[in-house]
Amino acid sequence: MSHPIKLVTEDGKSISAYVAGAPKSTAALVIIQEIFGVNAHIRRVADSYAEDGFFVVAPALFDRIQAGTELDYTPAGIELARGLATRLEPELVLKDIAAAIAYARTQTDSGKVGLVGYCLGGSYAWLSAARLPIDAAVGYYGGKIVQFLDQEPRAPLMLHFGQEDRGIPMSDVEAKKALPFCNAATIWVSTMRTSRASICSIHW
């Protein structure tokens, strides 16, 4: 039930995506990758959510820069991933995510689409909740969210951070909690006494 597809964005760009699950599921999820691309780990995440009954789309956000990028978690992979991530343009990334959302919505009976993002994707969960037509979003360890605090999420949003994550200062997390529009009804910020790697393995 899983396979690659091509999505066409608003500006006419063709990007690849990994899909999993049965069409006409009750609801759909868009999975937003870490900085390592739609690699084996992200595909397992998609498959896991598909087993829970969702139709899942994971767009390849590096395709505009380097199509087919799949990196591992070695020091060399991390260095390459960071370099690619710095070349992403948020406006174009949002177009790619929007294409995934639009396609996912056609594959559900309810038309409901949520979004789950990790690392890089955790930051784009915030931006997507602020600017794209999604029904809800969840972000895990989104380290760049602090750059976008002026953009208020409109969709319900849940954020998760590890208290032992050395890459994201707790001061950044507290800055989110202190926002006037951050309340339990719209935005919920969770911290766990764990590291990023531990969070990454919780669901699957």
Image (tube, grey):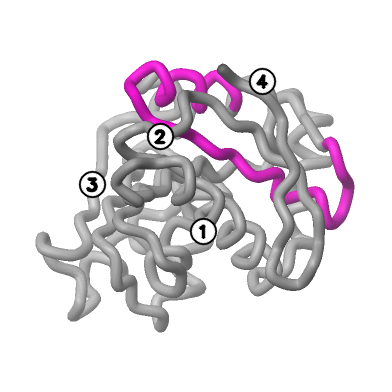
Q: Give the range drawn in magenta.
A: 43-68
Image check: 159 left or right of 140?
left
- For the residues bearing labels 3 and 1, Cβ distance under 8 angstroms: no
Work out whether mark 2 precedes mark 1 in sequence or the reverse, and give the earlier one.
Answer: 2
The three-letter amino acid code for the residue at tag 4 is Ala
Res 178 → quadrant? bottom left
The three-letter amino acid code for the residue at tag 2 is Lys
Q: Is mark 3 on a helix, strand or loop?
A: strand
Eye-nearest disc, 3 or 1: 1
Q: Name the residue under label 2.
A: 24
Q: How crowded is mark 4: few (under 14 residues within 10 Å), some or many (20 or more)?
A: few
Eye-nearest disc, 2 or 4: 2
Give how far apart the Cα atoms at labels 4 and 1 are: 20 Å
Eye-nearest disc, 2 or 1: 2
Instruction: Specify whether residue 37 is in view.
Output: yes
Q: What element carries label 2?
A: loop
- For the residues bearing labels 3 and 2, Cβ distance under 8 angstroms: no
Q: Residue at the left extreme? A: 184
x 55%, y 50%: residue: 103
Give how far apart the Cα atoms at labels 3 and 1 are: 17 Å
Give how far apart the Cα atoms at labels 2 and 1 are: 26 Å
The three-letter amino acid code for the residue at tag 3 is Ser
Give how far apart the Cα atoms at labels 4 and 3 are: 27 Å
50 lies above or below 97: above
The three-letter amino acid code for the residue at tag 1 is Tyr
x 22%, y 65%: residue: 177
Work out whether mark 4 precedes mark 3 in sequence or the reverse, and give the earlier one.
Answer: 4
Q: Name the residue under label 4.
A: 40
Q: Name the residue under label 3.
A: 190
